[in-house]
Amino acid sequence: MSAEGSATFSTAIVEPDVNRRSANYAPSVWGDHFLSYATDSMETDDEGEHKKLKEEVKRELMGNISKPLQTLDFIDAIQRLGISYHFEVEIDEILREMYNSHCDFNNGDDDDHHNDLYTISLKFRLLRQQGYKISCDVFRKFKNSQGTFSDSLANDTRGILSLYEATHLRVHGDEILEEALVFTTSRLEFLATHSSSPLREKINHALKQPLRKGIPRLEARHYFSIYQEDPSCSEVLLNFAKLDFNILQKQHQKELSDITKWWKELDFAKKLPFARDRVVECYFWILAVYFEREYALARRMLTKVIAMTSIIDDIYDIHGTPDELKLFTDAIERWEITAVDQLPQYMKVAYKALLDVYTEIEEAMVNEERSYRVYYAKEANQVRAYYLESIWFHQKHTPTMEEYMAVAMVTSAYAMLAATSFVGMGSVVTKDSFEVMVSGPKIVKASEIICRLADDIVSHKLEQKRGHVASSIECYMKQHGTTEQETVHEFRKQVTDAWKDVNGECLFPTAVPVPILTRILNLARVIDVLYKDEDGYTNAGTALRDFVSSLLINPVPIFEFESVCFKSKLYVYLNKYLNKRIITSSTKHPFFLSFTATLLLHNYPLHNQTIKKPTDQ
């Protein structure tokens, strides 16, 4: 681009003197940082090592089948480390067999462990995660004659934590899991203040972010430090997971670099300064929906769509006048470039960019002979609902809760994002899948409820202060005469019930293939993570910056000298080295070798392992 063109491109748009609201959104904290990632190429050595380690992990997985408890632990580690997508066939085969055989843990395992709280809770969670309708009655054996969970479980921290994670897979009617959640939460909160540091960290993380509701990629990043301290840690599995994470991170960095370049060329930060500049956060959001290598095209498309949705949302919420918004709504529903002529200049910029994004998607789908999918993505747009909310605001109208939710579930944009997320997913998605998912199934409605209510709970005060349509909080309080605290309590119950709907819809038989449902599940997970304590997306605070850094900037250290895995390797090496020295050198330097071993062990103490000191041979 020429200097003259660049200067013109960066000029802010001059608008007529109209009284407009301002949210004073914070600018992007990332600047040009992600423009520097120019390549996603995999090192040849990494590629070879990755392939080798993958085969070793597969052998280890299939080699433990005769030991069900070890197999469950290994599958759990694979999933928590974020690499289960490499072993979907093997994991499904193993868990299906366990489900069909009623999970007989007696075969080749210790009788003291095959039926304990930890094992049954782990088995239950893994099978429910896989879609199997295992009954929660398996936990009745842990209740006493009074019908409450036995006090004898109180000191089984491992089992309590495992049961706690299992309770988050509950569906409607799982009353025993409701009781288990209360029991385990109370016990874990006590243990969090009375436990040693590593265990306390693990408990606190689970209480704040249950595994079921966590973003898989973030949970994997966190779990590396936990797993490498586990005495049963598989070095092969850990090394493969770390290498896989770093290889994918390079690809993600390159994708975000390309998207950042696209965003910078649009120059919205200068042309539309009233809007949130959050393209990096948008990519993070979509990375949570799907991180796997095969979904690169889908990520690019959906990131651009959600970034444009954020801009459009701010036009309706903050900047547009009623007359302008009427024109804008009509233009978007027409999807024609000629409609741009009727728009004010700042809307022309956004409208042209929006059409360009969908043109790019159409071209990509034509090349894959799947152009029909773009129709569903366009039909899911929510601008008519945005417009109605703007009318309510300007008329100072507070709708009933029923009126509000009918519109606000649409403006959550989650039905649109769900439909658009399927567009680039390849052959797993069919036209029938789209028909089912755009018909308003329970899982989509549940994700909309989670998004809308969780968002309103943490953001309504600030939004009302700057000027915004009444949120669900204000609508419910006015209609039912409740306090804010009572309303929030009620909404949290509704969010919990919506999660039960999500869980139930993910159990077999499913209406559409599981990979499609997983996108909606992951969209709900993003809300749980980003809107837990604040509007993490809008504020782009410390927590979200740390999340972005952990997934998109900082690679996972391959060698960590304080890890149990490293110490175990050192232990084996020293034993071999010292014994070899003694055999070849007899008693030549026994004191020196013993001193060396003692010194190394002092600096790198081993958990539950001792090193043999050299003895005279």
Image (tube, helix red, strand yellow):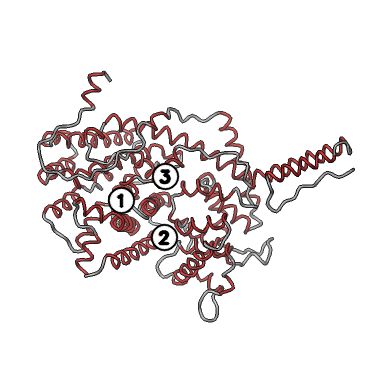
**For the residues marked 1 and 2, what is the alpha-carbon distance in whole angstroms?**
17 Å
Q: Amino acid at mark 2?
A: Asn
Q: Amino acid at mark 3?
A: Tyr
Please state the horizontal and vertical placement of residue 152, each as a whole percent of the image: 59, 73
Q: Which residue appears farthest toward the bottom when viewing the image?
A: 145
In the image, residue 396 sits, relative to residue 58, either above or below, namely below
Residues tagged 1 and 2 counted as in contact (Cβ below 8 A): no
Question: Whole-percent x and y of residue 16?
Answer: 10, 36
Q: Amino acid at mark 1?
A: Tyr
Residue under pointer 2? 503
Q: In the rendered structure, which disc, 1 or 2, sits on the residue that comes first in sequence?
A: 1
Q: Residues within 10 Å of mark 1 (few under 14, many from 20)?
A: many
Which structural element holds mark 1? helix
Identity of the residue drawn at 36% across and 36% down: 30
Real-space Cα separation, disc 2 to disc 3, in angstroms: 18 Å
Residue at 55% across / 63% down in the picture? 194
Q: Which residue is mark 3?
A: 290
